[in-house]
Amino acid sequence: MEKVPVAIIGNGNISPIYLKNLTKVFNDFVYVKGVCDLIPERSQNAQKNFDIPLIYETMYDAFRDDEIEIIVNLTRPEEHYGVALEALKAGKNTHSEKPMSINRENAKELFSLGKEKGLLVGVAPDTFLGGGIQTCREILDSGEIGEPIGAAAFMTCHGHESWHPDPEFYYEVGGGPMLDMGPYYVSALVNLLGPVKRLCGISKKSFPTRTITSEKKNGKVIPVETDTHIAGIMEFDNGAAGTIITSFDIWRADNPRIEIYGTKGSMQVPDPNGFSGPVKISHGSGQWEEVPVTRPYTVNSRGLGVWDMARALRLGSAHRTNSDFAYHVLDIMLGFTDSSRSNSFYFPHSSCERPAAM
């Protein structure tokens, strides 16, 4: 079967794992034809390290290449929307790192354009396709813990200024814990439990400024322009009730990452920012018991969503990180702050199918 030629735009910190997986692991359906970056040395290193045939001088050169079917958009977050828009205008399927957009309007534009042109539009994360969460999906779908009652998800830390060399973005509009880490958690929940029909939230920023203590910019004071503690409640279409907290304001907490509660037992879901376990279940009042991860892709498999898109193009199969799914996740994440500001429930204007199990 003919492989799907792809071009990777952006050869920064996350690109090596994509390049490794797309050239060595997922190369049954994917062929990386070329790379492009505003810093030429990055593209040259990518070409050398992963034996890539072409370097495109600009992204538009990649868009003009008639052979390229998928543009893999690994640019900086603030550039995701613009790059994806130009790729779609050029008639290319696109898969972008998260977030695709920081607002609903731009996301709607991209997804509507993709549907108008008959193109696939995919958005990271693809971690929910990994062995850990797919094992949880298998357990849930089998009825082992009964009918879902509820869920709880926690992503808590004290921010990135103590370790990240350039943490400013995380405190600007479009940053914050929900848009930064929420995609992993909300995608996992929607994959497991399905779409959300209503939600409410309280969001706040606890500190007006942050002082960078990482080495590169030690001592620099930065303003906090976005909410950094978001607490939400969701009602899923299936009747389950879920809670979520994402925070850059908490010094320490010992909460689980995600738990699912059913009529026959409970399940602990592994880190949604990874691909493996551990997965634990408890029946009745029993102790937590670790169960084997039974599904594939348990190492760092970033690029799995690109492979899934390429497979869909060749086989006509389901594309799991699709635009309806991605938009519903974004709609939910933005809805928590909308609810907080309006002092009312938010009813998402979007929905989606649960992605097919791997």
Image: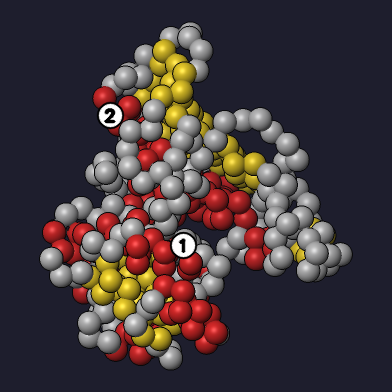
Q: Residues within 10 Å of mark 1 (few under 14, many from 20)?
A: some
Marker disc for residue 141:
2
Q: Please indicate whether residue 312 sits to the left or right of residue 325 in the image.
A: left
| Residue 64 found in image quarter | bottom left
Q: Please indicate whether residue 117 sits to the left or right of residue 175 in the image.
A: left
Decide if residue 301 is in sight here: yes
- SS at mark 1 in the image: helix
Instruction: Give the residue number, with chain letter if any, for mark 1.
Output: 17
- What's the residue at 54%, 55% (across, down)? 179
Q: Residues within 10 Å of mark 2 (few under 14, many from 20)?
A: some
- What's the residue at 54%, 72% (across, down)? 12
Q: Which image quadrant: the C terminus?
A: top left
Q: Nearer the viewer, mark 2 or mark 1?
A: 1
As shown in the figure, which amino acid type bears the numbered disc 1?
A: Ile
Q: Are marks 2 and 1 in contact (CB under 8 Å)?
A: no
- SS at mark 2 in the image: helix
Q: Position of residue 112 (x, y in %)?
A: 29, 68
As shown in the figure, which amino acid type bears the numbered disc 2?
A: Asp
Q: Which image quadrant: the N terminus?
A: bottom left
